[in-house]
Amino acid sequence: MRSEELRFGEDERQVVDLRLPDRPLRPIGLFYIHGGGWYAGKRADFHGHVEHFAGLGYAAAATGYRIDEETGYRDKLADVTAGLDRFRARLAEEAPEVDRIVVLGSSAGAHLATMVALGATDAAPIAGCVSVNGPGTMLPWPDQDANIATKISWLVRDGSTYEEISPDRQVRAGCPPFLFLLAEYEHLFPHDQVRELAGIIERNGGWTGTEVVPETKHGFVYALGNPATDRALESISAFLDRLQEPASH
């Protein structure tokens, strides 16, 4: 397994940590986006996942993005998109057999992964998205966690609107398959909003899977070596297997 740092900007967080396994490679590359309320967290949070899947033959990467309080939604999405472009370019150079990409994230990273997937184009397609404890909407809701409400308000200081940054307002026909993994004791992003997002995707012709992981709380997915995370990894692997079936190509 080889490790590389792919830089896409001058900020210390504008880096993609890439793991390339020894050949043969799977046809799907995995691109992880960390959480942390959009203003915390680090790409190393997903190194365990990246190394796990690299050990299974996947080219896998974890990206950083700017988290300082002066940044808004468009900055973060631009960073994630630039990191993804850098990942694509490196795969084209080193592993052209990897011809599809799945984006994955937890919490705020799940939000950004979802927005990347929903905004994918024919020129830069996304094969699938895994959202772990991400939001179904970014519009204000009753009993919204005060800290989350504050961080979302920071995101739109750049002139973005709540509708622009809200996944349920961005669904289109032809969006990629989604896997939603939910913590049983989730307290930040209501399950019913995620299920509503899944329903919107399906009504637009997309495929989704939703699974509640028992005995888990928000952020559970990072730490490997416990039954809950093992189950999440198995669910992600099953999703990837489905995408590699001939009819899914």
Image (spheres, rainbow, N blue to C red):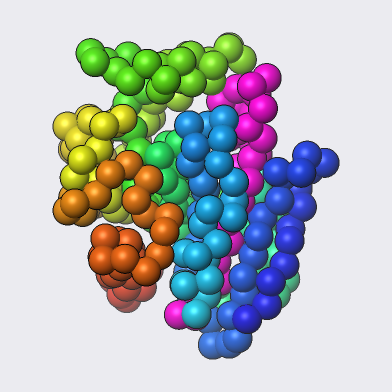
- Which picture quadrant has residue 78? top right
Of 106 and 199, the residue lying toward us: 106
Specify whether 52 is left or right of 3.
left
At a point 32% along the width and 14% down the height, the residue shown is: 140
Residue 242 seen in this snapshot: no
User: Relative to 233, is 81 above or below?
Assistant: above
- Which picture quadrant has residue 147? top left
At a point 29% along the width and 18% down the height, the residue shown is: 144
Residue farthest to the right?
10
**Residue 58 falls within the magenta-colored stretch:** yes
Task: Give coordinates of residue 234: x percent, y percent.
Answer: 29, 69
Task: Give coordinates of residue 37: x percent, y percent.
Answer: 48, 31
At a point 35% along the width and 38% down the height, the residue shown is: 134
Where does the C terminus fall, quadrant-wise?
bottom left
Q: Which residues are magenta?
A: 56-80
**Residue 44 falls within the magenta-colored stretch:** no
Specify whether 97 is left or right of 109.
right
Of 245 and 146, the residue lying toward us: 146
Task: Give coordinates of residue 149: x percent, y percent.
Answer: 40, 17
User: Relative to 82, is 171 above or below?
Assistant: above
Residue 189 seen in this snapshot: yes
Task: Give coordinates of residue 183: x percent, y percent.
Answer: 24, 46
Specify whether 228 is left or right of 109.
left
- Which picture quadrant has residue 20? bottom right
At a point 37% along the width and 54% down the height, the residue shown is: 221
Where does the N terminus fall, quadrant-wise?
bottom right
